[in-house]
Every structure is written in structure tokens, then in C-alpha cells.
Image (spheres, grey):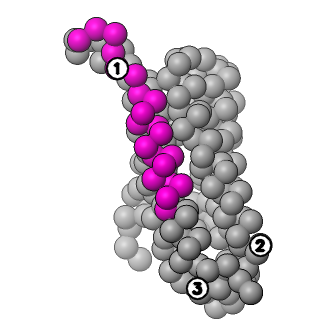
Amino acid sequence: MGIDKHRLVAFTDAIIAIASTIMVLELVNPHVPTIEGLAQQWPIFLAYLNSFAMIYLVWYKHNNLFQKFETVSMRLFYLNGIWLFFLTLVPFATAWIGEFLFSPIPESSYAVILFLWTLSFEMLDRQITKENPGLERDYYHEPKIRAFNYIAFIIAIFVAFMEPILCLTIIFLISIINMVVISRKK
């Protein structure tokens, strides 16, 4: 007896919606009612934009992936849970960056969480492919695209200790490049 795929997808969608909502609730109003006050918070907005873009893009990938097969094994169920675990850490890391702008530990932790989240999606994707021989993988799952993401996240982790805001910038570029790749028609 397998897990009902539609219930798992609905549960996953709910977790993604909650994570996105929690992130926006963590945004703090500026302490002064001016454009300058708002502009001073640009790093947290960049972290929020990064996080939202990553969540939104990966929701698309997850949705697309789960439309291609019917049976959810216990292994897929657990791998999806691991992936969701890392997804639920994204709002925490985003809020931490907001509280401690330009600090290496929150910024590098954010990159580590995103790296592990990406890696857990790779494991989920590989298991689905393994359990469903003949399943055509999407073009954005090409090894060179995955390798780019992993290498960029690892660079961002180490860069955070030298120039924390550059870590966010690298992650922002990862998001932009992934949006372009996903938008590409094959």
C-alpha cells in the first residue's frame, strides 16, 4: 500500500504556502516613515526575494515532477519529507539575516540550508527517476545546471565569511539563472 500522491502533493503545497507566509511576516517595518528607512532594509528584502524566488521555482519543479508518475513509495515519502524539512528552515534563515545584516554566520547558514535543500531535491528527483524507468527528466535537471547550482552555493557559503552581502548576491544570481533556465522552452 503506497501513499496517496494527491494527498502528499496537497500537503507539500500547504507547507510551501505556510513557509512563504511566514517569511513575509518576518519582514520588519522601517523604524522611520521615510524612503531612506525603507532603503536601509534592502538586505532583508534581498534575502526575502531570494527565498521567495527559490521557493516559487522549486514549487514549479516539484509540481512538474509529481505530475509524471502515480505511485509514491515510502522512500519517496521520506525524501519528500527531508526536502520539506530544509524548505521550512528557509524562513528561519531569512529572518536571521534580517536581524543580523552583514554577519557571516547567518549568511553562510542561509547558503548551507539552500544547498542542502537543493541537494535533497536532487535525491528526490533521482529516486522518482529510479522508481519510474523511462521517465523523461526535465531539461533543467541536466547535470551541468545542477553542478552550477551546487558550486555556486558552495562558493556563497565560503564568500559569506569574507563579504557576507556577496553571499546573498550570489544566491540572487542563482535564482535569476534558474528562472531563465526554467523559462527556456526545449
The residues colored magenta run: 13-33
Query: Spatial distance from mark 2 to mark 1, Cα to Cα?
Result: 43 Å
Q: Residue 75 carries which label?
A: 2
**How many C-alpha atoms fall within 10 Å of the one at disc 1: few (<14), some, or many (≥20)?**
few
Q: Can residue 156 be seen in this view?
A: no
Q: What residue type is labelled 1?
A: Asn
40, 175: nearer the viewer: 40
Q: Marks 3 and 1, how far apart in space?
A: 44 Å
Picture residue at 67% right of the left edge, 51% below the top: 85
User: In this figure, which residue is indicated by the disc labeled 3?
Assistant: 69
- Dividing the picture into quadrants, the one containing residue 102 is top right
Please state if 114 lies on the left or on the right of 10 as rendered. Answer: right
Location of the C terminus (image quadrant): bottom left
Residue type at the position of mark 3: Phe
Give how far across and how far down residue 105 sits, in percent.
68, 23
**Furthest residue toward bottom:** 134
Which of disc 2 and disc 3 is earlier in sequence? Answer: 3
Kind of residue indicated by mark 2: Arg
